[in-house]
Image: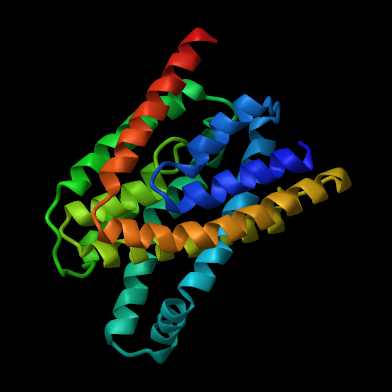
Amino acid sequence: MDILEAIILGVIQGLTEFLPVSSSGHLELAKVILGDTSLPEESLTFTVVLHFATALSTLVIFRKEIIEIFKGLFQFKWNDESKFSLKIMISMLPAVVIGLLFEKELESFFGGKILLVGTMLLLTALLLLLADKAKNTKKEVSFPNAVLIGISQAIAMLPGISRSGATISTSVLLGVDRTRAAKFSFLMVVPLIFGKIGKDLLSGDLNFQSSEIAPIAAGFIAAFLSGLLACKWMISLVKKSKLSYFSIYCAVIGSIAIGYGLLH
């Protein structure tokens, strides 16, 4: 992988991590188009690094909310901050369990599974369409909501299902306020990404060759900067009920991906 290719993939990750079009799915499609012949493990490693970059951009955008979460964790009082912190932790559990128990199986889904990506993009399109038609409310995320949103996040570990699309759609369909749904969706993934990075570093799974450092750094920076822009944009779009546009986009890209997969 050269630097230009890494930058392209980084920009794709930064934009699609927050926009409900599946960052992992687009990365897999881009790798096929760019002729990336990485093994599934290597492909997933680069994907994890780019996700780390967008997690950092989330920290920047939601720094005030994240400070409140930590306050809630260490105040040891049953208040709004502690409740929100607990909901974030509950929402993480399904993805943590799936990630730990089925890590190798998940890795096998990466590395050019175009038919899978296309099919999951069509599923994402359906979710977004349903969510866009749901009535807006002023409700907050409840504890049962946090469990269901967490399950949707775990399912979205498959390439092609948008994590933000799945979690925001689930929240909106459950009657959660759209702005709260978007913020909860973006915040709930941050601990998971940092946990994944920490686990891989401790286990030695993220061993880079010296020749890979420059492309990975370029991709990281591109993902971080584009992520900052996309995160703010997405919050505005969710509030204005513009998810149907992304539903159409996912349906078109998913159909093209399925057609490409069947012909190659």
| Quarter of the image that includes the C terminus | top right
Which residue is at a point 36% across and 35% down the rendered structure image? Answer: 249
Q: Which residue is rendered at x = 51% and y = 36% of the image?
A: 26
Q: Nearer the viewer, residue 60 or 24?
A: 60
Up/down of 256 relative to 148, above or below:
above
Q: Is residue 97 visible?
A: yes
Residue 167 lies left or right of residue 40; in this view the side is left
Residue at image point 73% right, 51% down: 218
Q: In the image, 177: left or right of 254?
A: left
Give the quadrant of the N terminus. top right
Asked which quadrant contains residue 89, the reply is bottom left
Residue 195 visible in image:
no
Is 113 in front, or is 128?
Answer: 128
Q: Position of residue 244 (x, y in %)?
A: 26, 42
Residue at the far right: name it.
210
Furthest toward the top, the residue is 263
Q: How is the image coloured?
A: rainbow
What percent of the width, then of the height, locates residue 146?
28, 62
- Judge whether 240 appears above or below 209 on screen: below
Q: Position of residue 18 (x, y in %)?
A: 44, 53
Please give the count of numbered marks on the rendered protein: 0
| Residue 222: percent from left, percent from top | 65, 53
